[in-house]
Image (spheres, rainbow, N blue to C red):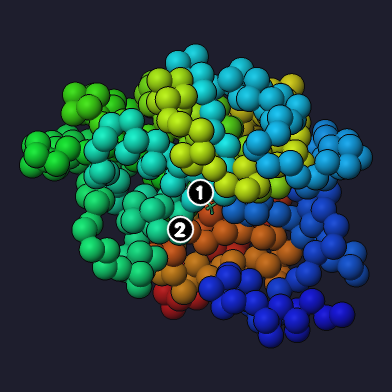
Amino acid sequence: MDPLAITRAIESTAANTFRLIFDPPVFTRGEGAFLFTERGEQYLDLVCGSATTLLGHGHPAQVRAISDALASGILHTGTRLLSPYRAALYERLIDVLPAHLDAVHLANSGAEAIETAIKAAMYTTGRRRFIAFEGGYHGRTLGALALTHSNAIRTPFEPWQDPWVSFAPYACNDAEAPEALAALDRLLAGAEERPYAGIVIEAVQGVSGVRGPSTEFLAGVAKRARHHGALLIADEIWSGLGRAGRWFSFQHAGMEPDLVVLGKALSASLPLSAVAGRAALLRQWPAGSHTSTFQGNPLATAAAVATLRTIQDEGLVERAAALIAPTLHDGLAGLSGVRVVGAQAAVDLPSSALCLEVQRKALTTERILVYGGGLAGQSLMILPPLTISLPDLQHALSRLRAIILRQVQRQES
Ligand SMILES: Cc1ncc(COP(=O)(O)O)c(C=O)c1O
C-alpha cells in the first residue's frame, strides 16, 4: 500500500494534506515532541496537530487511559446511556474551570462546540444575532463559518439570506482598545430593535497569528456584553487549557465569560470538544434540543480525563508560562514581528509565499514541522507541546531563526 498515492488520488482536495509539499512524510510512530517515519527518520513536531497534542505524542497517561477504555470493550454508547468516563470528565472539567461555570455540554469538534454555543445563546436569550471580531477564527461548519472573519474562508459559501453576524474591530493591545471599543459601541447602539444574543471572542487570537491579549479591550467587551444583555462567549479552542500560559486565555484579562468553548487540547488526541457555562444557561433547554451521535464517546472522554489530570499533575500551564514562553522569546530575539503568548509564537514574514517557503525548508532540510497562520497566511507559527525539553526547543529555534534570516535576506537581495 502506498499511503501517499492513495491519499493523493482519493482525498477531497479541501483537506490540507498537500499544501506544503507534493510528497509529505508519512509518520508511523510518535514519541514526545517527535514523529518518526517508517524508515526511522525523526521530525520535531512544532505544529501539534494544529495546537492539539499538548502532551506530545504517546504520553503514557493518555495511552494508558485510552487502552483501559478500549479494554472495556465499550467503544461507543451514545448519550442515552451513562458512561463513567463522561462523568469523570465532567468532574475534572469543573475542577479546572472558573467557579462560576458549573455545567458542560460535550461535542466532537471545535466547530460543533461553537454551533452548540450559538444555539445555547439563541435559546436562552431568544435573540438571533451575534457579534464576532475581525481576525477571529471559529471553524468551518456554517454557523462557525459565519462568525469567522476571513473573507477567503467565508465568502465562497455566502451569501446567507439574512446575515446574523456583525464584525467589530479587534484590539491586539491596549493602545488599540479605545478605537475598537468605540466601534463596538456604535454597533451595539444600532441594535436596539434587534439585539445581539452573544459576543464571540478569542481573548488571544491563535491561528490569526497570536494576537492579543489586550486587558483593556477584553474588559471593555465584557462590560458591554453585560450591559447589552448579550452572552459573552469565549472561544478557547486554540488557546485554552494551557497553550496561552494560563488555563484559559481570558484569564489574562480577568474576564468572566458566560460560555467557554473548548476543543483541541481537551483530549489532546481523539475528537472531543465542550461548551462550559452557568447551569442557568446549559441546564434549562429540554432533552434532545441539541445532541449528536458521538457526543461524549468513551475513548475520547477517557483521554480527556487523563489529559487534564496530566496538565495539572505535571504543572504544564505553569511550565508554558515560566519556561516555554521565555525560551520562545529568547530563541526568536532579534527577528521582527514576533509575538509570544505562553507556548505559542508567531513570526510575521513579508509574505505568505515566503512563509510557505520557510515551512518547506524547515520540513525538508531540518525536519522541523512548523505552522502557517496569520491574517493572510504570512505568520510562521511555532506550537510546541507543553512537555517539550528546553534544549530541543532551543535547538529548533536556532535552526528556524537561521532559515528565516536566510530566506528574508534572499528575497531582499
Ligand atoms: C479558535 C478556534 N475556534 C474554532 C476552531 C475550529 O475547531 P475545529 O477545527 O476542531 O472544528 C479552531 C480551529 O483551529 C480555532 O482555532
Provide residue 335's location: percent of width, then percent of height. Answer: 47, 53
The secondary element bearing badge 2 is classed as: loop
The residue at which mark 1 appears reads as 112
**Label 2 CB, ligand 1: below 8 Å?**
yes
Quadrant in which the N terminus appears: bottom right
The residue at which mark 2 appears reads as 141
First in sequence: mark 2 vs mark 1:
1
Residue located 91% across and 40% down the image: 71
The quarter of the displayed image where residue 129 is located: top left
Provide residue 23's location: percent of width, then percent of height. Answer: 71, 79
Q: Is residue 248 above or below residue 137?
A: above
Residue located 80% across and 64% down the image: 27
Provide residue 402's location: percent of width, then percent of height. Answer: 60, 61
Is 411 situated left or right of 299 in this image? Answer: left
Residue located 76% across and 44% down the image: 76
Provide residue 346's location: percent of width, then percent of height. Answer: 49, 51
Is 59 situated left or right of 11 in this image? Answer: right
In the foreground, 242 or 101: 101
Residue located 69% across and 60% down the image: 368
Kindly tell me whether residue 54 is visible in this rendering.
no
The secondary element bearing badge 1 is classed as: helix
Kindly tell me whether residue 128 is visible in this rendering.
yes
Mark 2, other Cα within 10 Å: few <14 / some 14–19 / many ≥20: few
